[in-house]
Image (cartoon, helix red, strand yellow):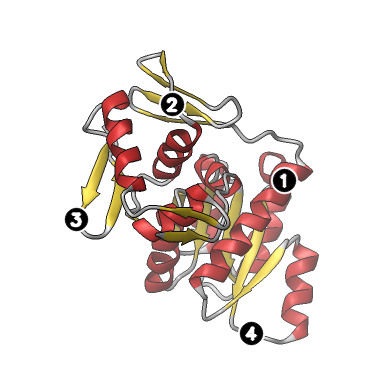
C-alpha cells in the first residue's frame, strides 16, 4: 500500500501552458540551463543573448515575463528594461533580473527601471520555478486576465474548469481520478511522471491506495481515449504522448 501525501494542484500547469517567457543572458550555458528547466514545466521559451536583440524579440513574441542578466554587452539589463517598459505594447510585461551582485545600488537602479523581482545566481531550479510561477500569477492578477482552463493536444481537449475531456469534439466520460490522472500527464507532455509522484499528486493526502491502482486507471484511460496517448516507461512511470 502507498500513502499519498500531497493533493493534486492544477494552477501551475495552467500558468505554464498559457505563458511565454523571454530569457536574456550573454552566457549560453545559463540560457540553456534556464530554458531546460522551464520547458520541462511546459512554458514556451524564447532566447536572446543581448539587450538590443531582447527588445526586438520582445516586440515580436509579446512575452508575459522577461528574465534577464544585468551585465550584458551592447546594452545592459537596466537600459533594456527601461526601453521595454517605455513601449506601450510591453509596459505590462513582468521583468525579473538574474544577478550575482549584492550591491544595493544595482537593485535600486533595476527597480527604478521597472524591475519586478530579482533572482540570485547561482540559480536553484526548484526555487527558480516557484519564483517564475509567482511572478506570472501576479501578471495575470494585475492585468485581470483569466487563465484559459483548456489544454489541447491534437484531437484531445481537456477543460479543467468543467471537468470535461473531448476527443475529436466528442465528449469522453471519465471518473474523477481518471480525469485528474490524464490532466496531470497532459499538463506536461515532455515529462515522465514517476509512479510515486502520480500517487502523491492525484490521490491526495492520507489516502491509502494499492500498488496496482495506477495501472488499473491507466488501462481504463487507454480503453476510453485510445492506447497511443500514454507511454509506459518500464519500472519508472508514465508520459503523455503528443499525437
Q: Nearer the viewer, residue 4 or 161?
A: 4
Q: Secondary structure at mark 1?
A: loop
Task: Assess whether mark 1 and mark 3 are in contact (beta carbons under 8 angstroms).
Answer: no
Mark 3 vs 1, N-terminal side: 1
Residue 220 showing in the rendered view:
yes
- Where residue 23 appears, x then y in whole percent? 50, 59
For the image shown, how many numbered marks are present on the structure? 4
Task: Assess whether mark 2 and mark 4 are in contact (beta carbons under 8 angstroms).
Answer: no
Q: CA distance from mark 3 to mark 1?
A: 45 Å
Q: Which circle marks residue 92 in the picture? A: 1
Residue sitting at x 40%, y 68%: 33
Mark 4 vs 2, N-terminal side: 4
Residue sitting at x 55%, y 52%: 204
Q: Which residue is mark 2?
A: 174
Which quarter shows the N terminus? bottom left
Query: From the viewer's perspective, is 164 left or right of 224?
Result: right
Mark 4 vs 1, N-terminal side: 1
Q: Is residue 198 above or below residue 61?
A: below
Q: Is residue 55 above or below residue 165?
A: below
Q: Which residue is mark 4?
A: 101
Q: Nearer the viewer, residue 75 or 173?
A: 173
Residue sitting at x 75%, y 60%: 114
Q: Nearer the viewer, residue 2 or 229?
A: 2
Q: Which circle marks residue 234 in the picture? A: 3
| Circle 3 crowding by C-alpha within 10 Å: few under 14, some 14–19, many from 20 | few
| Circle 4 crowding by C-alpha within 10 Å: few under 14, some 14–19, many from 20 | few
Residue 74 showing in the rendered view:
no
Residue sitting at x 35%, y 47%: 214
| Circle 1 crowding by C-alpha within 10 Å: few under 14, some 14–19, many from 20 | some
Query: From the viewer's perspective, is 28 left or right of 203?
Result: left
- Where residue 94 appears, x then y in whole percent? 67, 53
Which quarter shows the C terminus? top left
Amino acid at each position: 500500500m502507498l500513502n499519498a501525501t500531497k493533493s493534486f494542484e492544477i494552477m501551475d500547469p495552467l500558468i505554464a501552458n498559457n505563458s511565454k517567457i523571454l530569457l536574456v543572458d550573454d552566457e549560453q550555458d545559463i540560457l540553456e540551463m534556464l530554458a531546460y528547466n522551464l520547458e520541462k514545466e511546459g512554458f514556451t521559451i524564447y532566447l536572446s543573448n543581448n539587450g538590443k536583440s531582447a527588445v526586438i524579440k520582445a516586440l515580436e513574441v509579446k512575452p508575459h515575463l522577461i528574465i534577464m542578466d544585468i551585465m550584458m554587452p551592447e546594452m545592459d539589463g537596466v537600459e533594456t528594461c527601461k526601453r521595454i517598459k517605455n513601449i506601450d505594447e510591453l509596459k505590462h510585461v513582468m521583468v525579473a533580473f538574474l544577478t550575482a551582485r549584492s550591491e544595493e545600488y544595482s537593485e535600486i537602479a533595476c527597480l527604478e527601471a521597472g524591475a519586478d523581482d530579482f533572482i540570485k545566481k547561482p540559480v536553484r531550479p526548484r526555487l527558480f520555478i516557484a519564483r517564475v510561477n509567482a511572478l506570472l500569477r501576479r501578471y495575470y492578477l494585475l492585468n485581470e486576465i483569466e487563465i484559459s482552463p483548456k489544454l489541447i493536444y491534437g484531437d484531445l481537449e481537456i477543460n479543467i474548469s468543467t471537468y470535461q475531456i473531448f476527443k475529436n469534439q466528442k465528449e469522453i466520460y471519465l471518473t474523477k481520478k481518471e480525469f485528474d490522472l490524464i490532466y496531470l500527464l497532459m499538463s506536461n507532455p515532455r515529462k515522465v511522471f514517476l509512479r510515486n509522484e502520480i500517487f502523491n499528486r492525484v490521490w491526495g493526502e492520507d489516502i491509502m491506495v494499492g500498488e496496482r491502482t495506477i495501472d488499473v486507471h491507466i488501462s481504463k484511460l487507454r480503453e476510453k481515449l485510445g492506447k497511443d496517448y500514454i507511454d509506459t516507461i518500464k519500472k519508472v512511470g508514465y508520459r503523455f504522448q503528443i499525437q
